[in-house]
Structure formats: structure tokens, C-alpha cells
Amino acid sequence: MTVLKIHEVGPGVSVQDMGRSGYLDLGLSRGGAADTTALAEVAALLQQPIGAALEMAGYGGRFEATSPLRIALSGAPMRASIDGDPVSWHASHRLNAQSILEITSVTQGVYGYLGIGGGIATKPVLGGQGAHLTAGLGRALQSGDTLPLAPDRGSVTGLALSPKPRWDAGTIRVLPSLQTELFSEEQRRRFETTTLTRDTRGNRMGVRLLPQGEGFGLSAGGTILSEVITPGDIQIPGDGAPYILLAECQTTGGYPRIGTVIPADLPRVAQAGAGTKLRFQFVTRDEALAIETAHRKDLANLPRATYPLIRDPADIADLLSYTLISGVTAGEDI
């Protein structure tokens, strides 16, 4: 069996998939990739169904294959090379046996992803391969680990994608939550007009945001009972700084929720690095459904959105506008 040897690895690298469903009543949240769009992207680059990939938080590591294999890189852009030669991000490549893939620091965003042709062959637990670090299902990868890989029936490499940027956050669309109406009209208005900054505190459970000026909160004496919460919920704890729940959030909570980030925008929250600016905009249920429908259609079309990393000159209409050589010679020195 082909395996991926892990010679060196960052502290936030783990196997992640689309998560587990059906365990909320047991206190287990969905988990899975922080940026599920990136899982769809690496699958499209490899022209295979969406499965598990390596999620790398801020830093990757050094990897070696025991047999030739295909890889795809997507999510937050990171510096990557094969045997010392830089390779493109948001693209698929061939990794020869004993070649070293090195993925270092992120240049934008938070989470980068490494997909493998054929997929990762670790044994599912409760119907999923992803490590749920908060619940203690699986663990982060360590130097010296080896990952079993499934047989690869594909052969295509050298494909690229132009993903929609989601590293600068911008305006995040939210739905009203169960407690939205408990906040005053002034609080809700200010929530939509305030620019917030992603705090340094954040992980796969959630991220904290710092408001400009005073924070948010219910009027004195306003409390709620603990109830079911889900990824995307925006809790307002006692300090008034909004906290957005992510993939590994707890399943119940008692902080009031001023809104819930729609699923299509949640990867943008997860990929917002410390210091990134965010704004919020309330949308209606119908608007959210339309956005989600369009998002799912975009994901389904990703395999058809790939293009050759090296273009055929015959397909370049403005070929003469490119500088094809870096110098000229009179010919006498040849």
C-alpha cells in the first residue's frame, strides 16, 4: 500500500472531511474541514469525488510518497515546493516516489489543504475520517506518522483553478437567530454598520471579533436558557465581543445569538486571519436559500472550471503581447 510519510509537520495539521452528521444528541458537533469549499476544490483538481484531505492551519510540513501519486493544493495560499522547485497553489501536481513535498507558511488566510489522488485510506470513526480535536476523535498529525492512501484510478495532473477569494472576509451575510429580536433596534443597526476585527484568539471551535467602540449585549437582566447551537451562530458573551462558532463548536450554549452566518459565507469567516476586517449584513431566509443554491451549483461546476496549468500557445489569443524570452543577442556570441 502506498503511504505518505510525514517527516515534519505543523501543529495544526489533521485529516479532515465534510464532517459527521447525526450526533448532536450525543454532544458531538459536525466537525470536518474549516473550509469545506477547499475540499471541493482539491477534489475538482484531482477530478475525483469529495473526500478527506490534510488541513493545514498556518503551516504545512515535509511529506514523502513511497510510490508516485497525484496531489492537489487549495484553500489559503501557502508556499510549496517539490524537491526544492516551487509549485503553484490552487493546482494539481505529480509527486514521484521519494520526492519531497514541502509546504511552509501561509501567505493569506488560515487553512490550506493537501488532497491526494485516490484519497486517504484511514479507517472511518462514527462515519467520518476527520479528526474532531475538541471531542478527542483522532488527533493532529505528528512528525514520523505515515498515512495510508487508497488506490488512485485517476491520472490527470497539471490542472489549476481560480477560486473566489475568501481570505479578506469583507461583508458576511447572516440570518436572524432565535435571539436577534431580543437585541434592541439600535444594537442590531450598529451590528450591521460596525467594522469588526478578527482577534488573535481563534481555532476550529470559533473565532472572536473585536468591535470598534463598545461591544454588544442584551439589556440588563436579559438571559436565555442553554439550547442547541450550530456552526455559524454568532454568540455575544459578557464582554460584548462577538464570537462566531466554527466546525468544532460545542452543541449547546447559553450566550445570546445576534445572528447566524449563512453556510456559503462560513469558509470566509474560517479563513479570516488575525487582523482581518469584517462587516455583517442581515439577509432574509429566501435570500439565504438563493445564495446557498448558487453556492452549491458553483461547487458542482468546479470540475468543469479547471484549466491546464501550462496553456497551449495555440489557445492564447494575445500571444504576441507576452514576453517569451528574457534577453536578446546579436548572434555573434553564439
Image: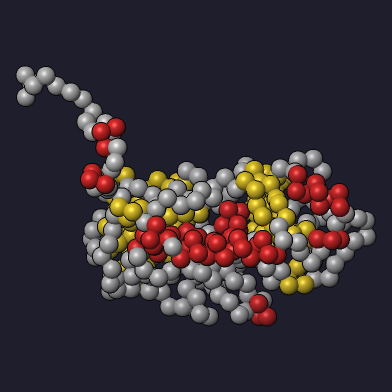
Drawn side of residue 328 relative to residue 56, left or right: left
One can see residue 59 in this view: no
In this view, the residue in front, 222 or 41, is: 41
Q: Quadrant of the C terminus?
A: top left
Residue at image coords 73%, 55%: 282
Drawn side of residue 141 relative to residue 195, left or right: left
Residue at image coords 91%, 55%: 219
Residue at image coords 25%, 65%: 155
Image quarter of residue 227: bottom right
In this view, the residue in front, 127 or 268, is: 268
One can see residue 97 in this view: yes
Drawn side of residue 27 relative to residue 325, left or right: right
In this view, the residue in front, 221 or 325, is: 325
- Picture coordinates of residue 48, whole percent (x, y): 36, 68
- Picture coordinates of residue 138, whole percent (x, y): 51, 71
- Picture coordinates of residue 9, whole percent (x, y): 42, 56
Drawn side of residue 93 relative to residue 196, left or right: left
- Picture coordinates of residue 234, whole percent (x, y): 72, 58
Position of residue 177 relative to residue 24, above or below, is above
Q: Looking at this view, name the residue that lies furthest to the right.
A: 221
Q: Looking at this view, name the residue that lies furthest to the front.
A: 317
Residue at image coords 43%, 78%: 123
